[in-house]
Image: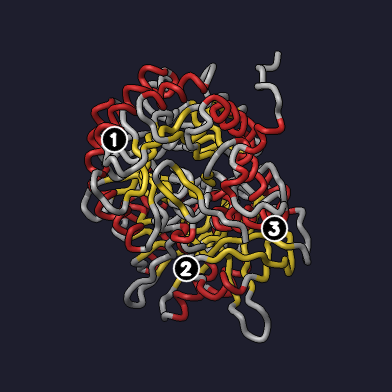
Amino acid sequence: MTPVQEVGEIFGVQKIGEYFQFTVVAPGIAASYTPGQFVAVGVGGDNTSMLLRRAFALYGATPTNDFAGTIQFVVAEHGPGTQWLVRRQAGERLDLVGPLGTPFRLPRRKVPAVLVGGGYGTAPLIPLAHQLIDAGSDIEFIVGASTASRLFGELAAKRIAGGVTVTTDDGSAGTRGRVTDALPAAIKRTNAHVVYACGPMAMLRAVGDVARAHAVSAQVAVEESMACGVGVCMTCVLPVRGDDGESRFVRSCVDGPVFDAARVRWDDVGSLPSDLVGADAMGG
Amino acid sequence: MADLTTRLASLTLPNPVLTASGCAASGQELHQFFDVAQLGAVVTKSIMVRARSGRPTPRMAETPSGMLNSIGLQGPGIDAFLENDLAWLAEHGARVVVSIAGGHTDEYVALARKLYGNPAVSMIEVNISCPNVENRGQVFACDPAASGRVIGAVRRAADPKVPVFAKLSPDVTDITLIARACADAGADGLSLINTLLGMAIDTDTLAPVLGGVTGGLSGPAIRPVAVRCVWQVHQVLPHLPILGMGGIRTGLDALQFILAGASAVSVGTAVFGDPSAPARVLAELDQALDDRGIAALADVVGVAHRSVAEPVKESA
């Protein structure tokens, strides 16, 4: 799972709702990818003033067979970096580093699972669903967004899983409401042992709360702002409780992006709790 | 192939390209992309006496050709560092410059003693200029007397065989005064420069972007400031070795620092965008020397000063 840096040619860019789905030739990354991992993409071209890579959850990878291996990821137009990226076309080249981060952990035995995706956070859950089904687990999907054009992967989810619930905040598709409104029923219906989620931080926290209330574990993939993506800059940290019971700022790029939701101290994200290891040294 | 050998006081390095403190952790992550033993040395993230959590997030903001950070020296403390990080670097054959930081002179002295006699330590870089400590802008490196006290105490406490370099801040009226104070206190050389204190405000939330409010500005945006600092210090202290850093992204950027008077360079923020940047800069610098018919790096350290007949006056 050692990450590689490679320059890959864009095979295709497909617009899906408000998102852009990239397929890029990247055999080195495709070779060792596991669902939950991400790719860090250089933006702006040579001599750009944008120094930092942009991180995207991998939507899939096709390892090298008759053709060179490809990877897929989904981009939402957000700031100047992603604005540059979504204007790229097939044949252009991207500077990529990946696969990065700790993937989703699979259950040791086949157990029912609910997969919850918010916006383009559904992307990394699709390859995870294939993996779970191959392992014999029953799965259900809950796919949500603020509005219909920000849904992603709804059709792919329907092709893989029997049960797919769609929610939107404004009711423009599926049921009006939040993914977490539909989650308790899905957990009960499937007798789920585990919930997997990817999406905005507030959603992940709410998914973790619902899972805990139903005594099932939740693995959530976070999206923290990162500078390097490889573990050297220490900017993407979250307060997380460790195996020893002590909490530390840990890097979401290498220790995550997938965390056990019960270990993340959601209340303390963006602050410095006094019981964190080393917080007492911050005075001087 | 030019002769890339360089000297930082009593330390001889096979080449002049190092990592920069805080931009390479302790080398393990970057070793996935290139062999860290191939570099002149690995400069480790500033280590303190005790484990330190660092500041709350957000800790980073991208700025034009640069970035702001307010990490706040997150680290495991010296004991865990020696046991894990330094041991790993030694095992992998890397030369190591250990960066140390503290809130008081006593802490710097304690760190120097912990490193005493450790064969894995090639050099000590004394970070007296991190902007992410408690008294923003009141760092030791803003005051010649305070700088001299810390550097003198570290020099006395440290292994005499190991060079002690002082890392200075550009956020001062006259960096040559601080440089001279450090040299007088026994510094074997200087690392120039640390980040500049900066700030960004989010116009949607109407609040500062960084959890730490202010942060250190790094990247190519500060390169001209860094080259100027190296130039000015080399002019007044031509025999004091300089490790230059600040926005180096290419071999030609590195060459600018060498020509201004640095004997070696650190590649920092560029690593965040290109994890193999230090190895690439080394190859590019080697090529740049060949292209110019320069047989040895040592021949061109500070050579740009020769082209300037008169000492540079502050422009109005």
Q: Residue at x 64, y 73 (%)?
A: A70
SS at mark 3? strand
Residue B180 in sight here: yes
**Which percent across, then down, holds residue B71?**
43, 37
Front: mark 1 or 3: 1
Dot 1: chain letter: A
Q: What residue type is labelled 3?
A: Phe
**Which percent across, then down, holds residue A230?**
48, 55
Q: Mark 2 points at which residue?
A: A2
Q: Same chain for the residues at labels 1 and 3, yes or no?
A: yes
Mark pair 2, 1: CA separation: 32 Å
Q: Which of marks 1 and 3 is nearer the N terminus?
A: 3
* Left or right for B298, reference A188: right
* Left or right for B95, reference B213: left
Mark pair 2, 3: CA separation: 27 Å
Q: Which amino acid does label 2 sit on?
A: Thr
Circles 1 and 3, Cβ within 8 Å, touching? The answer is: no
Q: Name the residue under label 1.
A: A279
Residue B289's place in the image compared with B164, above or below, is below
Classify 10 Å Cα crowding around label 3: few (below 14), some (14-19), many (20 and above): many
Q: Which residue is drawn at 22% across and 39% down?
A: B113
Residue B201 in sight here: no
Q: Name the residue under label 3.
A: A20
